Amino acid sequence: MREPRRKKSLERNRLSKVPTGIGGLDEITEGGLPRGRPTLIAGASGTGKTLLAMQFLVNRASKYGEPGVFVTFEESAPEMITNFASFGWDLDKLIEQRKLAIECVSVSDVPITETGAYSLDGLLIRLDNAISSIEARNIVLDPMQMLYTQLSDVPLLRGELQRLLQWLKSKEVTAIVTSERQEGVSSQSLESYASDCVILLGNRISDTVATRHLRIAKYRGSRHATDEFPFYIGERGLSVLPITSVLPNYGASSERITTGIERLDTLLDGGGYYRHSSILVSGDAGTGKTSLATHFARATCERGERCLYLAFEEAKDQVIRNMRSIGTDLERHVKSGLLDFRTMRPTMYGLETHLVVMEKLVDEFKPAVIIVDPVSNLSDIGTIRATKSMLARFVDFLKARQVTALFTWLRQSGGETEVGVSSVMDVWISLRMVESDGEQNRLLHIIKARGMAHSRQVREFVLSAKGVQLLDVYVGPSGVLTGSARVAQENCERAEKLERQRRFERQKSELKRKNLELEAQMAALKAEIKEVQDELELSVSEEKTDRRATSEAARQMSRIRQADKRTKESD
């Protein structure tokens, strides 16, 4: 009985949390912000403090029906309403519904002096009125340092801040206070002292590319992620994706889907790719990586499934035009809504922000297949190691979402740079150019395909008006022959085969002629033997006749002699 009671006691004492409704933030805070307690959001100017705070209020009001108050010390209500309309938030409507109140407090309205009489009583009265007016459950103070920028008495300041935050706790409202993050002894360090949760925002620039990042520096009474996470500000607000916490705990599908190329399906154990797998197609420039990728995209759409195509190199219209030359019509799938092209420049964001953006696009479009062409362009803004780490997390994300992914990789001169990222892929198809007899030809080789038997033979990769074709290459003493050299060799082999066939026919005809001659000779011999046999039989017959005649003559002679003897005796 004691154990169940203990568990119930732990449940009652567990810290209550308020979900923010912000993608990823609730995950890394393991449930949201502490209910009825203050949270500090600190960061430099432009890092998104005000946006995060307002997004929290809007989400709590629109999704959970909890009214909130936004107290601003910098902007006016009309300015805020206009600014946040760009994110699709109708603050006027929330204000009319009494789900939101914007309280604009000028610093001049809150007299502050460094005397023993200093207090924030006037501010507390205004806050109490604002909270009571709509029965608010949440409140934001943005930015707090505007109240005491002229004060130097740190102990006095700390005491008043702590009193303000304790007063908010007594009102049982979930509070967010924002502050500029500064060096040394700053207002942020004073506010963090009294805050139960501290969220730090930053904006890092590397090689002229900016990346916003977020870290939970403090959270009293709760576990939380301690890593630094990138976040993205998009058309719907701020989103944090806890990419470093993704674990490979997804399932594995046994269903097979076509590559869009019949002969390639045959090479992959006759069935194509596993659904939800990751495929890497690498090769030099011009080897046909995009052609192979678009065949897969077309096959996906023809099954009635969605395909998201992220192009880091070519524009949508250029890809569609180019693929028509090999008999692949992508435009009709774009018009049907099954194929969505998104073109991005690698230098638009850092690696982490690219990952956040790509994951956001996947969550919005919900494709069955995603193609990233070429993902190697991201290595221009980061090392191979960093790119591999980013891809590993993206692949885990896609498998958790049950999305099949195909990545193309432009091989750099001087080696196979894709080896660094191939380990996170399930299938690796290598394309390369070979030169022989003054021409270049494409070759395809399946290096690995996890979980399936696959051909290890090299195939010639041909682009024609009918699409991609895989042909057998000629392997002989002189090596691998492709293109015109292969055609010439095949013609030579056909000529030799024809000559062997003709020689066989001649030998067959000669044998037939000799058989006929032998049969004629045998017939003549048989006739001769028959003639001799007939003559022999005639001789035997004549001899028998002669013997009978002689015997008869002898008998007659004997009778005559006996008759003469009787006559003489009678005489």
Image (tube, grey):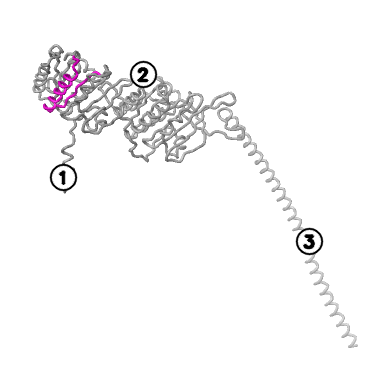
Judge whether residue 54 can be spotted in this image: no
Q: Is residue 346 above or below residue 278?
A: above
Label 3, label 1: how many angstroms apart (C-alpha)? 131 Å
Foreground: 205 or 318?
205
* Residue extent of the magenta highlight: 151-180
Disc with the residue nearer the chain's start (2 vs 1) = 1
The residue under label 1 is: 5
- Would you say residue 22 sits in the magenta stretch? no
Judge whether residue 157 can be spotted in this image: yes
Q: Is residue 557 left or right of residue 253?
A: right
The residue under label 2 is: 209
Q: Is residue 447 left or right of residue 141?
A: right
The residue under label 3 is: 535
Q: Specify few, some or many for label 2: CA neighbours under 10 Å numbering under 14, 14-19, or 20 or more.
A: some
Q: Amino acid at mark 2?
A: Val
Asked which secondary structure carries label 1, the reply is helix
Task: Locate residue 527, reporting x and y percent.
Answer: 74, 55
